[in-house]
Amino acid sequence: MAARFVRTFGIALALVVGSLIYSFVVKGGHVTWPSMPSFARSGGAERVPLARTQFTITDGDTIRLDGAAKGTRLVGFNAPESIEPRCEVEADLGRRAKARLTELIASAKLELEMIPCSCPPGTEGTDGCNYGRSCGSLFADGRDVGDVLVSERLAVPFVCGSTSCPSTPRPWCK
């Protein structure tokens, strides 16, 4: 019985490893995570059309694509928390940022650009990288929604390096 389990497990493991090698070789090193919906997958940094019905807004800097296990963190800015704010000022600004993002996308032509998260190599797609979320930029009528929220003081710039991020800026609660 144990030998049968080991053999079956070995075959399954070989299939998974073979699939990853195939993805790496055939797709030029771009492995897509199973939790990412097909409409958001791309082999490189390119904008893809996105319908308003293909995602929900979590807060001012996070959306959840339909079919995704986790959210997508919009990069380049940090919006105040609306779910677990640290103070009442942040709660108010968080609600306003989420409402403004909702307005921006309501009737705009939307595009999404999926990008690698700023995490240590080998951790993307895991809880050790951005809480398992994917990363991307959302554009409404060609304009990055983060730039709009920053210009309206509903978010602050937040730029990460290639494999790590600085402390998350949260200037709302002093």
Image: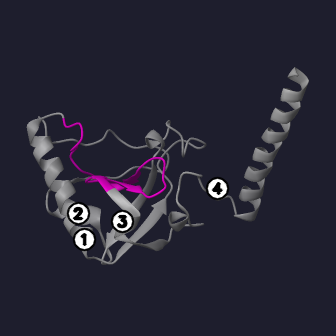
Distance CA(mark 4)–CA(mark 2): 31 Å
Q: Which residues lie in the magenta part?
A: 57-85
Where's the C terminus, which quadrant?
top left
Q: Which of 3 and 48 is in front in this view?
A: 3
Q: Name the residue under label 2.
A: 102
Q: Mark 3 points at which residue?
A: 138
Q: Mark 1 points at which residue?
A: 106
Kind of residue sitting beneath label 4: Val
Kind of residue sitting beneath label 1: Ala
Q: Which of marks 4 and 2 is in front?
A: 2
Q: Nearer the viewer, residue 171 or 141?
A: 141
Distance CA(mark 3)–CA(mark 4): 21 Å
Q: Nearer the viewer, mark 1 or mark 4?
A: 1
Residue extending furthest toward the front: 1
112 to the left or right of 157: right
Q: Where is residue 119 in the image (x, y as percent from the top left)?
A: 50, 44
Q: Mark 4 points at which residue?
A: 31
Distance CA(mark 3)–CA(mark 1): 13 Å
Asked if the residue at tag 2 contacts the one at tag 1, i.e. Cβ–Cβ closer than 8 Å, the answer is: yes
Kind of residue sitting beneath label 3: Leu
State whether residue 33 appears in this view: yes
Asked if the residue at tag 4 contacts the one at tag 3, i.e. Cβ–Cβ closer than 8 Å, the answer is: no
Kindly identify the residue that appears in the image at 9 percent across and 41 percent down. Answer: 89
| Element under disc 2 | helix
